Amino acid sequence: MKYKQEPIFPKGFMWGASSSAWQVEGGVNEGGRTPAIIDLNSRKKAGYADNSIAADHYHHYKEDVKLMAEAGFSSYRFSIAWPRIYPDDSGKVNQEGINFYSSLINELVAHDIEPIVTLYHYDMPVWVDEKYNGWYDRGIIEAFDQFVRTCFVEFGDRVKYWHSINEQNMQICYGDWLGISKNVETWFVDKWKVNHIMNLCHAKAVIACHELVEGGKIGPVPGYVPIYPYSCDPNDQIAAMNAEEMTEKMWNDLYVHRKYNTFIRRYWEENNIDPDIRVGDMELIEKAKIDFISLNCYRSNTAKYCAEDTEEVPYQLNKSGVKGNLTFPKVPGMYQLVVNPYVETNDWDWEIDPVAMRYMLRYVWNHYQLPMMITENGYGAHESVSEDGKVHDPERIKFLRDQIYQVGLAIMDGCEVISYNPWSFTDLLSTGNGMSKRYGLVYINTTDKDVLDLKRIPKDSYDWYSKLIKSNGKRWE
Ligand code: BG6
């Protein structure tokens, strides 16, 4: 539908940006923090910088919050590093870790910025990984519960919006890349057991939040990639639905309806997969009623029919940042992903598709009727400081303008959206490309090769975004 007026964002709409602990903080050996499984990810997988310094937010958080406030932020979505709170197996809380987050939260609150906290964003303590074989052993459920309960008790007086696990679906779909699968060979089967344990952890967090945080609200953060059928061939439509089920819908159905949907149960039966659902598990999940759904959305995908006798092809994400290095998957009998001729792509072959934002919000609202926030959305690029000492990022401004406009249209369509937090506030480590793929509204002066002075340089997009949000979504120029 075309509206007679520009989109209107509701009063009190929360505008901010997003980060995660391991990607932004640095200070990995400070304040009593011990290693996390993700610590070496970038360097190990592709030779980029690791997170020992990252954006050094650990030492610059006051300056960073000041910049957020100057831009007019009313929210900031970040995560708490589990190994800062429980650095070892002793069961003893690390007071220095509590103090760090408490101080960050105080700083935000003092500047009228709503803290929106994610409890798990890939940084499992190494001691948990060693003791429980990562997410494979049910012992992790109690350890996670202890961690999240501590966070609710310590910060729940000031933090009212919580997230359980970041992109559980992506961690399961890309277990190897995000460091949670232990054996690529058996992941096809193992992932459903791991996924079930994650669901139990999510459920415990939801229940504990409602028990311990007065007025606390909590939701999941699926990584969402809207999927279109390649054509009006009915088989392409079914392929798109299959891709949707296997990469996102079954997770969202579980969070909202609190049971596994029939599609995935039939899939397990057909493939002789036992997700190890034990007595009492589904009763626990049933109690975990979420308050909202948060969505990380960067791109869209397009699916096409894939015959049973097609040779299987695994998904190879583009890790080089040179266009043309992505291989779409073929899943025989289910779907294959293909190039969408109607959309542009970035240097990592990610589709640039603003309409997908409106489509996703409409889809999720139609299916689940829960308030939604955008917790990630952004434009990753190779960037450097210009000769004039500034960072000019017109592509990011265009990306954000187009995407936010579509959020506005979705709101006009009747969707309840409460907050928009693009990835990311400052530049920070990309999951696979270190500092070479920058997303920030604020440039961090450092590179993968050399640690520079870490100066914060607001990019042109920072100024543009600031004007837009100070006008509550009215100043688009
Ligand atoms: C999201 C993750 O999936 O995508 C973030 O929650 C991540 O942690 C972001 O950084 C962008 O992906 P990438 O690989 O470009 O860093």
Image (cartoon, rainbow, N blue to C red):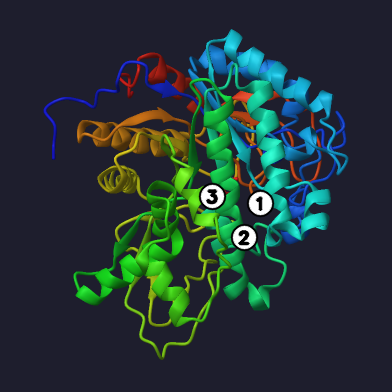
Q: Earlier in the sequence, mark 1 or mark 2?
A: 2
- Label 1 and label 2: CA atoms lie apart by 7 Å
Check disc 3 and report the residue beneath it: 167
Quadrant of the image for the N terminus? top left
Does residue 144 lie above or below 136 as drawn? above
Q: Amino acid at mark 1?
A: Asn
Which residue reaches farthest top? 110
Check disc 1 and report the residue beneath it: 433
Q: Residue 186 location, x and y as percent?
A: 65, 77
Check disc 2 and report the residue beneath it: 319
Q: Amino acid at mark 2?
A: Lys
Q: Residue 343 location, x and y as percent?
A: 34, 55
Q: Amino acid at mark 3?
A: Glu
Circle 1 or circle 3, nearest the eye: 3
As rendered, which of 403 and 152 lies closer to the eye? 152
Q: Earlier in the sequence, mark 2 or mark 3?
A: 3
Q: Are marks 1 and 2 in contact (CB under 8 Å)?
A: yes
Q: Earlier in the sequence, mark 1 or mark 3?
A: 3
Dot 1 beta carbon under 8 Å from ligand 1: yes
Does residue 301 lie above or below 159 as drawn? below
